[in-house]
Amino acid sequence: MEQKKRKLEFNIIKDDPTMGHKGYGVGSLSLENITPVMLDVEEGEAWIEEQAMHARSKTERGVKYVKDRSEFPEEGAKKYWVIWVAVDIKEDGPYYAGVTACELLINRPARRGYKSMPEHVNHMDKAMKGKVIVHNMDAESRKVLADFLKSHDEGMWERSSIELKEEFEK
């Protein structure tokens, strides 16, 4: 008997982490409303990758990361984008609140990878704060990401801000 594959969904805010009280936990970040999306530039394909939240996606595993990009062997490397998508809810339903993209380079033959961890952390934070940073992506990758977000949930795309949609058209 064939098992059905679980469809991955975007995380939507579930609970108030402080449960209404003003004491312990106030000011802590909840990652319940952020979802990592991976985009393979070469293949022009995007997918939700839950393990990327902790840098443990299938794409990221099995390589040693170099801290300096000049040490990264470019020949044979493949480029990916790790995209942080924050979802929020307004009266008429959930929407894409923040979207930020970070570069990820993987060289499987050399078993090396490069990514800027501070950039990934800062971009995740910015997505959670409702910022849109996709101008650093190439035009084709932005189109692939926009198509992915639209096809995943047209309603969420429609409810998203005009500023968010305009960033994908630049």
Image: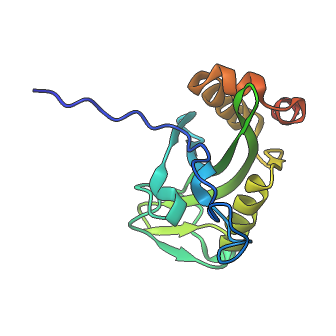
Say whether residue 84 is visible: yes
| 167 vs 68, nearest the viewer | 167
Q: How many marks?
A: 0
Q: Quadrant of residue 122?
A: bottom right
| 64 vs 27, nearest the viewer | 27
The N terminus: image quadrant: top left
Position of 93 with respect to 55 (left or right) is right
Position of 135 with respect to 68 (left or right) is right
> Is residue 107 placed above or below 167 in the rendered structure?
below
Say whether residue 80 is visible: no
Residue 145 in the image: state x and y as whole percent.
66, 34
Position of 25 with respect to 60 (left or right) is right
Residue at 67% over, 56% down:
103
Residue 6 in the image: state x and y as whole percent.
34, 35
| 1 vs 64, nearest the viewer | 1
Residue at 57% over, 27% down:
152
> Is residue 78 placed above or below 140 in the rendered structure?
below
Residue at 43% over, 69% down:
63
Q: Quadrant of residue 42?
A: top right
Residue 82 in the image: state x and y as whole percent.
61, 52
